Image (spheres, grey):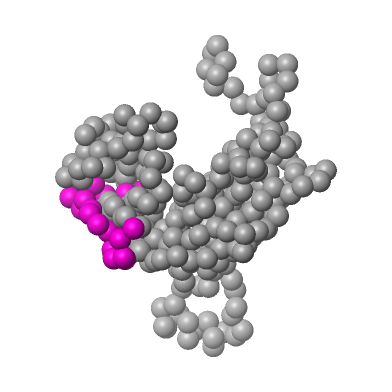
Amino acid sequence: MGPAGPVTWYSFDTEYSACSVESCASPTWGCVLATGTYQVNKVDRRQSDAWESEQDEAGDSPETERLGRIYLHKVTSAGGSIECEKVFSVDCPAVLDMKWSSSDPEPRLAVADASGFLTVYSLGEGETCKLVKCGNVCVTDGLALALEWSVNNDTIAVSDSKGCVTVVRVGGEGLEIVTVLTGHSYEAWTCCFSKHDPNLLYSGGDDCVFNFYDLRVDDKGPVKKNSKTHLMGVTSMVSNSQASCEREWELWTGSYDETVRVWDVRNVRGEVEIGRR
């Protein structure tokens, strides 16, 4: 922030629409910025005028393909300015969400994409900063919409367009689906682990429902939920990550109703604070 307001230090053309931007602090590479992109293209498979006529009569929509690309930038500061250098890019299915794990020993990048896959990358060793695929797993036959690492970095939750949340274990042997949680009638737009207990998981959906899960319980559904407070779909959520246990109960949600709500997760009947646009 400069004396006259925000300053733009760097910009670049992502070609496709930028859908997710995440930074990490790497012990080897310093500050690394990942940008995930999304593009929907129509696929023209028409073979003849007769084929086109049949499709029009059937009312079918044109086929589409969802393309994506991930960029890596190294970010450095020198002489009071910020410098960004593009060091890597890779084509992939359209990216809907990305998150870095913590730096132990190096951060890993988890990616949720439009083909329904969760993919985990590591930062490559050697002279070049790049992404190296560690493994991937199909979590849905719809779209993988959002993801979150658990606080101990051994589990990832992925919400999807079918209204489910898939819990995936990340280990030396690759990725393994642990369980699939239900609880939403429409798209599960977002999910979030508690930053203080890896067994507690939350999700929000287009059905205005805010779900609470306990992974120690065998039931695949939520242990409690709120379906009356959000006036429109729940689109984002963040758990309080402060080390102090005094506010470990605090969680924020965002919604299409343009309201940010602060919750006490011990009591889901209503929010404890709201902020409207």
Instruction: Tell me if I can see residue 261 in this picture.
Output: no
> Where on the picture, by quarter, is residue 94?
bottom right
**Figure label count:** 0
The image position of residue 239, as x and y in percent, is 38, 40
Q: Main secondary structure of the magenta part?
A: loop
Can residue 56 be found in the magenta stretch? Answer: no
Asked if residue 154 lies left or right of residue 31, the reply is: left
In the image, what residue occupies the spot 47% across and 82% down? Answer: 55
Locate the N terminus and report the quarter of the image it occupies.
Answer: top right
Q: Where is 206 relative to 115, above or below?
A: above
> Where on the picture, by quarter, is residue 255?
top left
The image position of residue 63, as x and y in percent, is 53, 73
**Which one is in front, 130 or 59?**
130
Can residue 229 be found in the magenta stretch? Answer: yes
Q: Residue furthest bottom?
A: 50
Q: Where is 63 relative to 98, above or below?
A: below
The range drawn in magenta is 216-236
Asked if residue 105 lies left or right of residue 216, the reply is: right
In the image, what residue occupies the spot 30% across and 37% down? Answer: 249
In the image, what residue occupies the spot 54% across and 13% down? Answer: 4
Locate the C terminus and report the quarter of the image it occupies.
Answer: top left
**Which one is in front, 93 or 178?**
178
The image position of residue 11, as x and y in percent, is 65, 34
Q: Where is 45 relative to 273, above or below?
A: below
The image position of residue 34, as x and y in percent, is 62, 44
Asked if residue 277 lies left or right of residue 118, the reply is: left
Instruction: Tell me if I can see residue 180 in this picture.
Output: yes
**Which one is in front, 21 or 66?**
21
